[in-house]
Amino acid sequence: MKIILRYLVCILLLSACSVQKYLPPGESLYRGANIKVEKDNETKTSKKQLKKDLKQALSPTPNKYILGQPYKVWWWYVLGTPKKEKGFKAFLLKRLGEAPVLSSRINSKATAENMESYLQNSGYFFSHVSGDTSHKKYFVYANYQAFVNPQYHLSEIVWAGDSSKLIKTLERISEKRSVLKPGNAYNLNDIKAERDRLDLTLKNRGYYFFNPDYIMAYADTSIGAKKVKLYMSVKQSTPDSARNPYRINSITVYPNYSLTNENVFAATDSFIMYDSIRINDTLHKFKPRLFASTITYRPGSLYRSRNQNASLNRFINLGAFKFVKNKFERVTQDSGYKLDATYLLTPQKKKALQGNIDGFTKDNGYLGLQTSINWKNRNAMKGAEQLGIKTTAGIETAYGDSIAKKNNNYRLGLEASLKLPRYFIPFFHIDENHFYPPNTNLILGYEWYRKQLFYTKNFFKFQYEFTWKSNSRTQFNLGLFSLSYLNASNVTDTFYAEAAVRPSLLLNVYPEAILGTSFSLSKTIGQRFSKNKWYANLAVDLSGNVAGLILGAKHYREKEIFGAPFAQFVKTDFSLHYTRRLKNNWDWANRIQVGIGIPYNNSSVLPFSKLYTIGGSNSIRGFRSRDVGPGTYRTTDQDKLFFQLIGGDYKLLMNTEMRIPLSSLFSTAVFVDAGNIWNKTGILFGDKAKLTKNFYKELAVATGIGLRIDATIFIIRVDLGMPLRKPYLPNGERWVIDQIDFSNAAWRKENLVLNLGLGLPF
């Protein structure tokens, strides 16, 4: 740490000494602006707020400084101009450097005029701003003096003009959800926003050729009392084409369009009609039904931009087309107001083959290598169906737990998936025209898993599910039916010998079937650059309910299906994320996760694939994944060796993290994590693992710091965590803050946990 601090100090000293000598003759470095505000006695807005508002009109933006030194400018000069635009030097210059903002770019008079215009546009009429510059050493400062008069407010909004249908329509829609309301402060941006809103509303009522510039606003400030009477109207120069609503005359689709194909527009006899849509598919690549289900309007309907955008978005999300373009042209030979719609679609390459080789580490102490081959057909049945076949092979070997060494894991897998861009329910047809097309996913898979010294598992699965969005921020998933079947074979005598001492280990090799239905809902609130952003996810997973009713299951592993006892449980998950943007672009990120799994009747514990886990790089970062819980139980090396997974039926996880940007390349974080998992019964790990009313006294707590490296495509994350509270210690001794000793090698080895990951933890 001392070396890093010394390095930073040296960089600052070098930048202080060296930037001046790099500056061109007669130039100074722009240091920023000083704004002084004087206001009329009747001006209610505070000087602080006025300064903040006026800063929006400042130009240019000064360089970044640390301790008064332009460190990024120093890097700019030291690195110099790169010879190649995409070389390593160019990358460093983009990440570390910043071009100097020189005095020749400062025009205080023009900026003062911009600030004055800003005040006028914000309703501070008859205000005045003046500006000049001053120098200190090799820095130049801009100085501005503003005198601000009282702000004017809207008294009423009046629509003027003729009694045409367009004016009446504008007057009606302006009464609903208008940005302009009597009593609001006058603001030119509000007027522009209202014009855009009216234009968008008209576009959804057939006015295809209308645009916001046709709306005129006139402010009358002569009525007194610092009030503005706002007159709005349609310009007399507005053409007839923009004054009338349009209907769709025809819809034509070219599904094999190419920029290099000049003969794409075929003769009339090459078209077929399907559901009132003209289709030119001379190559017969697509079924006509695809276009009928994707386009959300028909000839004779009123033009609506909402339908236009929805149809474009649905074509793009099909995945079968590389480029999607549409155009609307007025029908000139008709005296009415009609549009011909045309879609030009460039298909994606139909088939693709991709191979991957991945190296990885796991929180359970294994590292491994996995290879996969993916084959995809993007138009398998001529309806934009995506057929995928994936094969995987992998090996994992233990590197942390000495007891697990030589107990390698081997995997082989085969999975076939079919994605249909519609609701697929046999004997039923569902019409829909949402902005996003729904998808039906069918997945069939098999995995062979060998735990070298103990057993082999054969895992079969089938999933039938729907996914859809009601809007860009709300997504649903309905797993109508899923079947998982697990069967173990080649169980070794070593494993059975250990199971004779600890019978609960047999749960690893018992056959089991899971007949499931699931539903999940996720919702995001807040735009990308919003100050407050929320994300919530709710999921419900049910298994064995219908089978239990039919077969009358009442006791553990009593009833079977396909030769194996079926699981019965209800599982509910809830996750809530909240991020707040603070000053200096700091982000305060928070997450809470609650999971409740209730096995019943034919099951006493959740299936291993459904258990909750905790700890590791995306959870409690001061503990490894198998070192927390369940409850106050502390897992042993034998547990880690023999159990496929160590988890619980219940989960509580809480995270809070302060994310601090250092530069465009680096950022850091300080975090605190807390949580634990618990079991419903003591079958696996005894009574210490059971959930009790004192669960809040059994939470693990950890803290730490992290470094993030933005590699543009992905974020490389390094987190160093340490425990503050260990739930497996005796009650009253669980807080271990007083035991922190960074100088002790043994303490560091036991308590410091280094986590590596890609992307943010939550």
Image (cartoon, rainbow, N blue to C red):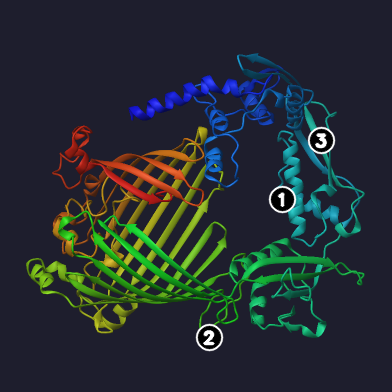
Task: Decide which of tag 3 and tag 2 comes sooner along the chain.
Answer: 3
Separation of residues labelled 3 and 1 (CA atoms): 19 Å
Disc 3 element? strand
Badge 3 is on which residue?
Answer: 229
Q: Nearer the viewer, residue 655 or 181?
A: 655
Q: Nearer the viewer, mark 2 or mark 1?
A: 2
Q: Position of residue 86 (x, y in %)?
A: 57, 47
Badge 2 is on which residue?
Answer: 427
Task: Decide which of tag 3 and tag 1 comes sooner along the chain.
Answer: 1
Is there CB contact under 8 Å for labels 2 and 1?
Answer: no
Q: Is residue 559 left or right of residue 325?
A: left
Q: Position of residue 485 (x, y in %)?
A: 30, 77
Is there CB contact under 8 Å for labels 3 and 2?
Answer: no
Crowd rating for badge 1 (residues with CA inside 10 Å; few <14, some 14–19, many 20+) = few
Give the residue at the far front of this rendering. 83
Residue drawn at x 56%, y 63% is 470
Question: Which amino acid, mark 3?
Answer: Lys
Badge 1 is on which residue?
Answer: 176
Whether residue 607 is visible: no
Is there CB contact under 8 Å for labels 3 and 1?
Answer: no
Circle count: 3
Q: Nearer the viewer, residue 162 or 339?
A: 339
